[in-house]
Image: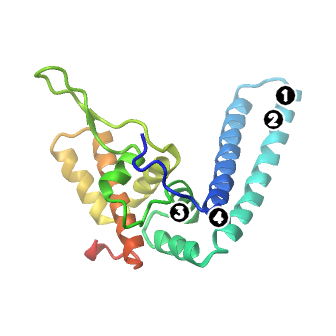
């Protein structure tokens, strides 16, 4: 369940969210059609799928232009995109996903614990009686969580802070998935901090 679920979104934020959601849908359709193409033998079906793939690729390119124009049309939002993109591993596409589906990012009224809960990165325990179960994550907003995951995979090679955190947890015997989720929470904290400070990413002061 979202923390402070009644957080107000402006009309601008809702429109950006709709545009990004549409792009996510088209990308999902493109992925499915590419998989279908590999398993179809009938030439007419393959032609139909190939034609649809071409349409989807062009539609996504056109939508990317629309999102760029719209997202950068508001000065405050354009600044947020610039700040988010100052973090290695985060490009415009990932920044749009985060800012559209996690508008609480950079808001002083939200702390990191609340943001981790909103994105489904807060750890929960499977405890029963005197036994302690494994910690796991659940729920939350999938699109910004997936964006953080992709950013972390790229950021491992570009942000020593994340690389060191991952290696430290792995040396302690933590599963790889646990280490990655911890890095996702760390990256979420970095983004929240730089958007609040309105200063570009500098690893030494995070």
Q: Nearer the viewer, residue 86 or 191?
A: 191
Q: Which residue is mark 1?
A: 45
Q: Are marks 2 and 3 in contact (CB under 8 Å)?
A: no
- Point out which mark residue 12 bears: 4
- Looking at the rendering, which quadrant does residue 157 occupy? bottom left
Q: Where's the N terminus, which quadrant?
A: top left
- Looking at the rendering, which quadrant does residue 132 occupy? top left
Distance from label 3 to label 1 (Cα)?
A: 37 Å
Q: Which residue is mark 2?
A: 49
Mark found first going from the N terminus, 4 or 2: 4
- Point out which mark residue 95 bears: 3
- In the rendered view, would you say 10 is above or below 73? above
Q: Nearer the viewer, residue 97 or 153?
A: 97
As drawn, is 129 to the left or to the right of 202? left
- Kind of element beneath mark 3: helix
Mark found first going from the N terminus, 3 or 1: 1
């Amino acid at each position: 369940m979202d923390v402070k679920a009644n957080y107000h979104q402006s009309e601008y934020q809702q429109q950006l969210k709709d545009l990004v959601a549409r792009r996510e849908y088209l990308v999902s359709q493109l992925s499915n059609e590419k998989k279908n193409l590999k398993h179809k033998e009938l030439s007419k079906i393959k032609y139909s799928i190939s034609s649809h793939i071409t349409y989807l690729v062009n539609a996504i390119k056109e939508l990317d232009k629309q999102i760029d124009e719209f997202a950068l049309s508001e000065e405050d939002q354009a600044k947020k995109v610039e700040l988010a993109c100052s973090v290695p591993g985060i490009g415009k596409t990932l920044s749009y996903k985060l800012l559209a589906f996690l508008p609480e990012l950079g808001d002083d009224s939200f702390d990191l614990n609340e943001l981790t809960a909103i994105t489904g990165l807060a750890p929960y325990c499977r405890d029963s009686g005197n036994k302690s179960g494994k910690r796991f994550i659940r729920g939350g907003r999938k699109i910004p969580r997936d964006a953080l995951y992709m950013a972390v995979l790229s950021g491992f090679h570009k942000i020593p802070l994340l690389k060191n955190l991952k290696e430290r947890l792995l040396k302690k015997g933590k599963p790889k998935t646990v280490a990655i989720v911890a890095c996702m929470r760390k990256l979420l904290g970095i983004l929240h901090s730089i958007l609040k400070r309105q200063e570009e990413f500098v690893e030494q002061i995070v």
